[in-house]
Amino acid sequence: MLSKQPFMRRIVIAFVLMTTLVSGAFSLSIVAIVHLIEEHLVSEEMERELDVVLHQDLKNNQAPRLDSSTRFYASNIDAYAIPPQYANLDEGFTEVVEGDEAYYVYTQIINDQRYLLVQEQHEFEKREQALFNVVLACFLLSVIGSLGLGWVMAKKVMTPVSKLAQQVRHRDQLLDLAPPLAPEYPDDEVGQLAAAFDGTLGRLRQSLERERLFTSDVSHELRTPLMIIANSCELLDEAELPALQKDQLGRIERASKDMHDLVHTFLQLARNKDYQTFSASSSLRQVAEEQIETWGPLLREKGLDFQVVNEGDDDGLYNPTLLRTVMANLLRNALHYTEQGFVRLTLKPAGFTVENSGTEIPEQQHEQIFQPFVRGEQARGEGLGLGLSIVKRICVHQGWQISLHNLPDTGSCFSVSLKGVA
């Protein structure tokens, strides 16, 4: 479709179409005018010649004085009998084609008698054909010329637009030090577009800066209460406590440490653009064992069959906090949305899956479910719908891939590939 063509090509196509329509209409007009003039002039000339034959030559008992290309016929003169092919022509001028030959025929009816002049048109046809060839050549040249001129004009028009697009695409435009675009362009439509981009990029910078400051401030302020929790756990650990309370204290201490690592990671994310700079020190199996120890008891307490399947060892190293965050959020979702049945964690070479027998997620929500503040139709608890959004952001910036599909019977499966192919 024309609307999906590049803008420069559309300009050239429009230029050529306009020239084709105008040149075509002009050429057809020339052909029509030549044909009308031909009919009018030949008709007048043949009428004059027929009048001379009827009122001068025949009255004086003379043979018609005509050139070799013109013949005279009359219905009442046997010597000039009308051929059958001309016998029923209308009065006036007619053009007759017989095979490869063409003739002009002028018919006049006087007192119910029919008189004709038939004239060969070979010479005029040659001149007419030459004129038509010239018109066709001019038409084709105008179309070809419009193609070249349209390309030149389109390139000249699109040069500042392409330059502006390249500048907007450049990542440095998002930096505070990037100069504004509008001063480089005149005060025309392109200049107005550049000014609009300046305004939009300015608002985007402010939004990114607010988000960075918010994340940084929240991460910084959470350090103090987390430190208090950690210190309290250390003091309680020195006291004599029953085994059950010791176990609960250990879970609190591990959760506090995980939260401290997560806050530290988010603080780094707020200060660094390159997520790949985080240290990779843990294997997939090490992180999975930690999560199995954390979430296994909770899943079994709910009456769920928690299964762990190992389909192959992975020899890669990953940032433990980021990988832990991804796996923990998926297991937490499985815990919240599965009332009965199973939750299965499957470890694979360079990836893992989390399956559950809970409610299926409609296919039209498979992409939306990873957006911030979006919760499924069966949402429970007081969550804000940020867990899967955080998972998606971490996967994108780490070069991982996450996908979702429903299981054949019921439930859903989240697949994470740590090598970029889900």
Image (spheres, rainbow, N blue to C red):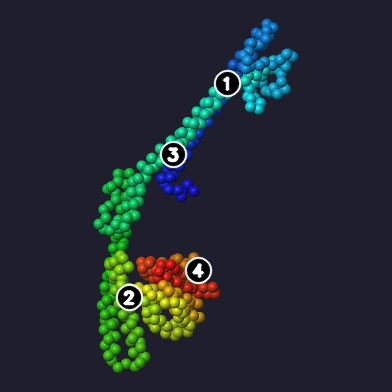
Q: How crowded is mark 2: few (under 14 residues within 10 Å), some or many (20 or more)?
A: few
Type of amino acid under label 4 = Pro
Query: Quarter of the image holding residue 84?
Result: top right
Query: Is residue 373 among the parts visible in the rendering?
Result: no
Residue of label 2: 281
| Closer to the eye: label 4 or 1 | 1
- How far apart, in angstroms, are the residues tagged by discs 2 and 1? 96 Å
The residue positioned 66% from the left and 8% from the top of the image is 57
Residue depicted at x 69% and y 7%: 61
Q: Which of 293 and 44 is in front in this view?
A: 293
Whether residues under marks 3 and 2 lie with C-beta atoms below 8 angstroms apart, the answer is: no
Using the image, tell me which numbered label, if any, was put on residue 362.
4
| Dot placed on the residue nearer the N-terminal end, 4 or 2 | 2
Q: Earlier in the sequence, mark 3 or mark 4?
A: 3
Decide if residue 231 is in sight here: yes
Taking 114 as reference, is 239 above or below it? below
Report if the CB atoms under discs 1 and 3 are less than 8 Å apart.
Answer: no
